[in-house]
Amino acid sequence: MTPSSCRMALDIRFPPSIEGRRIVGEIEAEAKRICEKKIDFKIEVEDFTPPYTAPVKSKLVEAFKQAVRRVKGTDAKLVRKTGSGDMNIFGTEEKVPSITFGAGDPKLSHTPHEKVSIAEYLDSIKVLKEALIILSQ
């Protein structure tokens, strides 16, 4: 038996160079083409979080780079992450300079192998404190 209805949920991540509404339009156009008026469908956007890329050359990034150097004695590693969070809203819609900073191996984020040692955690607090001092000067 063929079911009379179905639902599909999509979580689409896209770079700032692509307009999110364009993606929805392209999905709708392709669905219309495939369904050829034989199947009814409805697209509902439950949530829309705009992509955000922090500028590498900013006071915020520079403060954290200096803080990492002072606290850990090494250069900070800048990593491009493709997830989303509050930074997407604050950075894109509210225009608040935003970055993500934290302890642990970013390659293991949100996996069963993610872990942070107590030493890394305590160092991250020191880095955050130092960055705030630098930014306040």
Image (cartoon, rainbow, N blue to C red):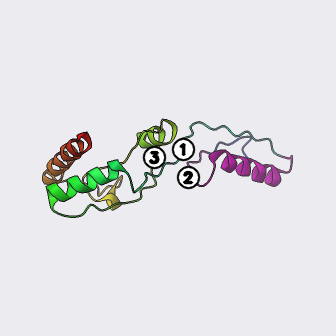
Q: Which quadrant, please, contains the C terminus? A: top left
Q: x, y (%) of residue 6? A: 68, 43
- Mark 2 secondary-structure assignment: loop
Distance of label 1 from label 3 (alpha carbons) = 8 Å
**Above or below 81: residue 87:** above
Foreground mark, 3 or 2, reads: 2
Residue pointed to by mark 3: 84
Is residue 4 shown in magenta?
no
Residue pointed to by mark 2: 16
Query: Position of 23 compared to 105: left or right?
Result: right
Range covered by the magenta-colored residues = 9-38
Query: Position of 115 compared to 44: left or right?
Result: left
Is residue 14 shown in magenta?
yes
Q: Which mark is residue 132?
A: none
Q: x, y (%) of residue 57? A: 39, 56
Camera sees residue 16? yes
Which amino acid type corresponds to the residue marked 1 in the rendered image?
Answer: Pro
